[in-house]
Amino acid sequence: MNKPNQASRMDHLVLPPGARRSFYVTIADGPYLRHRDDVDGRLYYQDRHLTVEGSTGRAKRATWDGALLSSRTFSGGVHYYLGEDAASDLGNGDDNDNGDDAVTTGDSSSSASSVLLPGVGLDDIDGWTLCANVTVLGMGMGNPTYIPRGSFEPLTLMRQKTMGMYVTTTDGPYIRASHGDGKVGTPQVANSDLVLYEGIGKRYPMVAGTLDARLFNGIFQYVALVIPTSAPTVDVTDLWVANVTLRAVADAYVDRDDPDGTFGEGTSLMVDGISEKVSLIQFDLGILEGQTKDAPTQVLSATLRLYSAESKAMFGGYVSVIPNGEIDEGTASWNTVPYADEIKGNYAGRFRSVWPMKFYDIDLTSSFRGSNTIPRGILVRISSDQDDGVVYRSRNNDDDGGGGASGSHPNGPRLIVDFAYDPDTNKALARSFGSDPPTPSPTVLPEWENARVPTDVTDGYFNYNPGTLFGPDNWGDVEGDEWYDRLRGLDADTRRNRCADGNEQSPRDLCYTNDECIEWHQPRPRVGMYGLRDESLYRPEPIIMHNKLRLAYPQRQSDRESPEPPGIDFAHNVYRSGIQDLVNIDIKVRSEHWLCGKQYDAEMQLFHVHKELRSIENLSILIEAGGQVEGEIGWEDNPHFQILLDFFQRKFNWDTGSCARKRRRRARTLFESRGKGDDKKTRRATTKLRARSSTFDDVSTDDHEYPSTIGSDLHQKIIDKVKSLVHRRRDAELDRWDPLEPWYMYKSIHFWGYLGSITEPPCFQDVHWRVIDVPMRISMKQYIQLKSLMFDHVDPDTCKKTSTHFEESNARPVQPWTEGSVYRCRRKDYMSDMEREISGSNHGFKEEDLWMGVDNLPYVTPEFPDAG
């Protein structure tokens, strides 16, 4: 049990490229094979060559009789290799001569042409445009051959547009081709930015006619840009801005399994991928109908809001918008609605996990862009390809049968529209919605006053104001907060204060070195089992402290304990000491470490306890913020960092709400103790206090508590509890937050290293710092939120602000270097693990365009590359 059994080697099963095969494993007698139920419908395993699907497996009995059993997920291992004869037919003039990727079969140089066509599947030769003709060195079968950066100008693909790309070689060896399923335009792979479809095959030289559908095997490097128009599409100086919330005028769902059934008169909108239920919602835009940019009324934003009515679902559906689409909810069925069988209109996005009895929004603004005329209405289509259906609330009241024009249920679908209009042209709109236009962005950034020294300071109090008795120059007598005393396995004396007499103090301004890099491979992170969302089974503890945000992970006694926290395998390590567990993450504003005289906006410090060295190993990521200030185009939000901010925001809101409730209780107790509980003045005061704190009354410590629909049946409660635990365990596996997520958080595998101390009292030493040499980027909006979390936080018990910042910073000043090794690890010291594997050399690629950084991402030039 729980140990794999390896079958004796049999004749190889040949799986042609692009084909799908099923296999069936059983035993005729003896103990039965253990199986895993397929619960989530996702891919079980996938690499560049092979995909094992978890959602299509089926179970049969050993005698191969009877019906199919429930779906199964393969839990074993498959040994495979790429056959050499797979390329034997390439280059002989048949349909395989020209593919659509950049993987060649040989190692010699070849001339490659790249051309583009606006649109997929077109056969007009004149429509193609030559972009580049370059000579590249083929990297061999199965290895990507990169087209060097700068070979052609970057290609701009506008949102909601489609562009075709054609890559071939002018002489051998030929590019390997992968055949599609024969349907050009079928999505092959997609993320939130880009969709790759099955394309057409063309011969070289290009002539009329196309070959079978092709799949792209290569790698795209792209950057999502916000490109402003050359001039305003509307002269907003003469426009006013209004907001209107529109109710749905019709809604229904249709069901493939009941193609003639009509469900528009019900109270539910169902979406399901197995039984194929599709929901349709119609909105009337009559208030904006026919308005053009010449008599300007322009949609600035449009948001669809739905209410989840029943059980939780891991996926809420794909959303598309059909301009001028209509349905009759009384007769709408799968057979009568033209929008049921396939996705039509403009794709707007998708709802992710959905919890019951909550509102969910999705942005539909892009569906109104690119047209001079606002449609008279829109039809929103919601579909799914997942097996856990979701139910939204329809517009119909419980007692009106969905009929007629009422459709006024308060939780029904809504379309919230912000639009600009000309009050001179649209008199009716001016009378209904007239208001002064807001400024397009904040005129000033928020500022925070220096923290005040409390009157009841303790021996452990310190702050960052150099003009007080508690500032950094006076930390030598401050007691620690006992946080580090709880960490097991440290040799350092965590109670001895070294702030004044330490010889290896942190932080440092890193710009010079006195030693060579002592590490020989990149830090190798482990994600762990912890997440930051409500549905995560294991979550670290968020702590908003007076000088930092801290994410605390429980320290394990041994590596066999569960749950497993994130961790890192450091190179400068005891032999085979493994991955070191993360114990906490601290975030400071501004950065404590500097690079060559430059201080950054913030710093994220990851603390690990080394089991063998019995020391603290820190990995530090500098944070740089950018925003729309004085006309500068700002950086977009960092989505992975936003998850962390939202996690702390819930803690912030709870503490603020607790303070408000305690104030109200104290006031009520005071009034009652004075015998004035029924006094009118008392009631008015209590009402005002309740109004001020009502914002936080609904804050809950457990977001999983919902109104129960189960009766008093104890047996049913036990069953539902077990189901809940199963679902939460599944969610935990799918929703893990990686503090070293590639690119958004962790952009370089190289760093500055030295032996120092912690950066707050008691400043004990024997802390090994590694400061990553490429900063993380966040938006200015996120930076303001980060500072607000630190500087505006209140103690839930005393209702007093907790921050000890000075000049919007809680960073210890840079400490002078006295002794110890300072080194810098660069690319010349080690390559990324991925580049070593692909290049087949410990020295990596010679061509800079092929250099790789974190995982398979491009190499990023570090800050101050020549320093040190």
Image (spheres, rainbow, N blue to C red):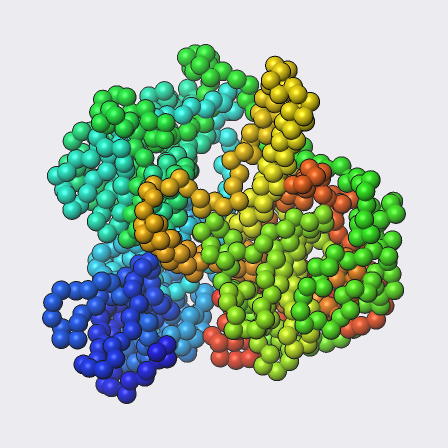
> Would you say 161 lies left or right of 212 here?
right
Left or right: 329 with respect to 574?
left
State the quadrant of the N terminus: bottom left
For this orientation, the residue located farthest to the bottom is 8
Which of 425/404 is in front? 404
The image position of residue 82, as x and y in percent, is 32, 78
Q: Percent from the top left, x then y, of residue 427?
A: 43, 12
Q: Quadrant of residue 429?
A: top left
- Residue 52 visible: yes
- Pinpoint residue 699: horizontal percent, then vertical percent: 53, 38
Q: Position of residue 244 (x, y in %)?
A: 42, 23
Residue at 52% across, 70% down: 561
Instruction: From this view, report whether residue 505 is shown above or below residue 123.
Output: below
Name the quadrant containing residue 136.
bottom left
Near-viewer residue (81 or 230): 81
Q: Relative to 263, is 581 on the left or the right?
A: right
Q: Do we see residue 853 in this rendering?
A: no
Quadrant position of the C terminus in the picture: bottom right
